[in-house]
Amino acid sequence: MRVVESIREMQTHCESLRLAGKSISFVPTMGYFHEGHLSLMKKARETADHVVVSIYVNPTQFGPKEDFSKYPRDFGRDAQMAAGIGVDVIFFPPNQEMYPDGYQTYVDVEKVTQNLCGISRPGHFRGVTTICCKLFNIVKPHTAIFGKKDFQQLAAIKRMVADLNLDLEIIGMPTFREPDGLAMSSRNVYLSKEERSSALSLVNSLKGAQKLYAEGERNAAVMIGQAQRLIQSARFTEIDYIKVCDAATLEDVQEITSEAVMVLAVKVGKTRLIDNSVLGEELKA
Ligand code: AMP
């Protein structure tokens, strides 16, 4: 497995693969891998001749009071895990390479980024779509694999790819969970034992919403109310949002008449966790 830090080297490598008729699948990440990341890499391995994974904690998607400097990092461990899946190249650029002095260009997807994390994390999605657009131009992939755990991010990336006519296919993969249902996240390492157990209220409230939906409930407020009560009854939790949204537009819905998703963001202690589930879809845990 090769580790590449330079943009020029990465572009030259990927261009030569393309000229040789090889397909490239790409998994962008911020590192500190868990099984969720590995499931995307496995999918990439099945999808293409060549697998590129990027590890880059992107400063432009973090707010000034967020955990950019504290974000967990362990390149050696990540490299070993990626090699175990058969990843061909890790792209691991320094900040100066990605945002050199004088940098001033950003990609802004307007509507689908407005609600949810767009409210609580202003500028976050602008950072995400910008870095992904840059990475797509560097890696030149045929397919890029993202997790549905970051539901709004996936929607924004798909919109950007369609709107800017980027020539690649975006594949969304199911949320990988711990055996007890907690969605895997690099940020789970921040949780104390007690917080870890309270964090289960997120997936449990999604399960509750799924149960109501299966019983025929279509009123979003009823589902949100039940989730709110469950999360508030767990210790250390502070709700950022609990919403039921149209799965395509991510606008709030009151009465569910088309595909809808329950989306949550909750602080457990100091750690902000997100989770979601498309109503009527199996929640594997
Ligand atoms: P991150 O390193 O957290 O930016 O995530 C990199 C990619 O992994 C994104 O496409 C995430 O949606 C995806 N991802 C993160 N957690 C999970 C999970 N539990 N299951 C599946 N994909 C995930």
Image (cartoon, rainbow, N blue to C red):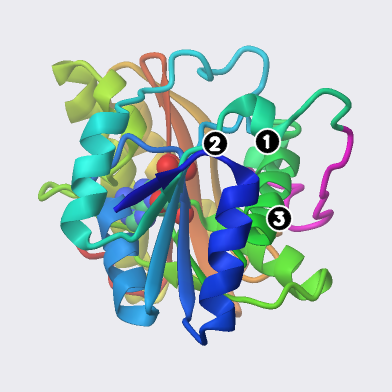
How far is disc 1 from disc 3 in space, using C-alphas?
12 Å
Query: Is residue 250 something one can see in this rendering?
Result: yes
Badge 3 marks a residue whose secondary structure is: helix
Q: Where is residue 250 in the image (x, y as percent from the top left)?
A: 66, 60
Q: Residue 93 carries which label?
A: 2
Disc 1 marks which amino acid?
Met
Disc 3 marks which amino acid?
Cys
Confirm whether the magenta stretch covers residue 154.
Answer: no
Disc 2 marks which amino acid?
Pro
What residue lies at 47% left-to-right and 39% top-to-bottom? 92
What residue lies at 62% left-to-right and 58% top-to-bottom? 11
Confirm whether the magenta stretch covers residue 108.
Answer: yes
Q: Give the range drawn in magenta.
A: 104-116
Q: Quadrant of residue 89?
A: bottom left
Q: Which residue lies furthest to the bottom in this view?
A: 21
How far is disc 3 from disc 2 in space, using C-alphas?
15 Å
Q: Which mark is residue 133?
A: 3
Disc 3 crowd, CA 10 A, few/some/many (<14, 14-19, 20+): some
